[in-house]
Image (cartoon, grey):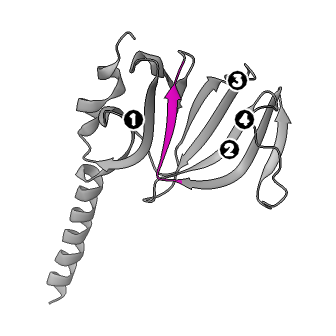
Amino acid sequence: MQIWKKWRIRLLLVLTMGLMIIGPQPYLELRDFHRQERIGVVPVSLQDRFQIEWIHSVELTPWRETYRVVGFSGMELAETSFRSFGAGVPANFSDRPNVHVSIDDGWITVSGLQEQRDRVLYLITRSDYMLTVRDQTWPLASFMPLGTSLELSIRWFPWWFRYIYSLEKKERNA
């Protein structure tokens, strides 16, 4: 009886490790919103951060949004950074106690937002939209024509998805 208990524990450990290695893993999925076509995926880990950066169309200054992968529930807008206040820039956070506003090296950063998102949409209107995940940056206009709506979401796929749908394999000249 004692041997069977040890075997069950070992079998459970092996199965758990196997699922962790070959089971579903989180990816940042990029989709053409209107055509509902997958553009590509980027492997991410739980708690990873990724950024979208562009030049604000009215203020003509850089803007950056940072998202965090949140467990099995998707992502959250963690912070937003910009170089100047103006059109569309949030200005009042007094009703949100966890939000912190700081200025560093010319960037105004609003952190502690923790705004849960299932997906986010960006209209890629110019070639200055950039996606950064860990140390890798991609110009989004190299994957999709200007005027396309980009949908970003966290999805779970098999481990081998990265080899078929990675952004490097999809890159093209726009």
Task: Please tell me whether mark 2 sits on a helix, a strand or a loop.
Answer: strand
In the rendered structure, does residue 121 fall within the stretch colored magenta?
Answer: yes
Question: Which amino acid is tagged 3?
Answer: Pro
Q: Which circle's residue, 4 or 1, is located before the other in the chain?
A: 1
Q: Which circle's residue, 4 or 3, is located before the other in the chain?
A: 3
Within the image, what quadrant is residue 88 found in? Answer: top right
Task: Please tell me whether mark 3 sits on a helix, a strand or a loop.
Answer: strand
Q: Nearer the viewer, residue 117 or 156?
A: 117
Whole-angstrom CA distance, mark 1 to mark 3, is 22 Å
Q: Which residue is mark 2?
A: 79
Residue 117 shows in this picture: yes
Image quadrant in which the N terminus is located: bottom left
Whether label 4 touches label 2, CB < 8 Å: yes
Q: Which residue is mark 3?
A: 62
Q: Which mark is drawn over residue 30?
A: 1
Which percent across, then down, holds residue 101?
82, 45
In the displayed structure image, the side of residue 125 where residue 56 appears, left or right: right
Image quadrant in which the C terminus is located: top left
Q: Which residue is mark 4?
A: 81
Whole-angstrom CA distance, mark 4 to mark 2, is 7 Å
What residue appears at the point 43 percent right and 38 percent down from the top-left corner? 151
In the rendered structure, does residue 61 fall within the stretch colored magenta?
Answer: no
Question: Which amino acid is tagged 2?
Answer: Glu
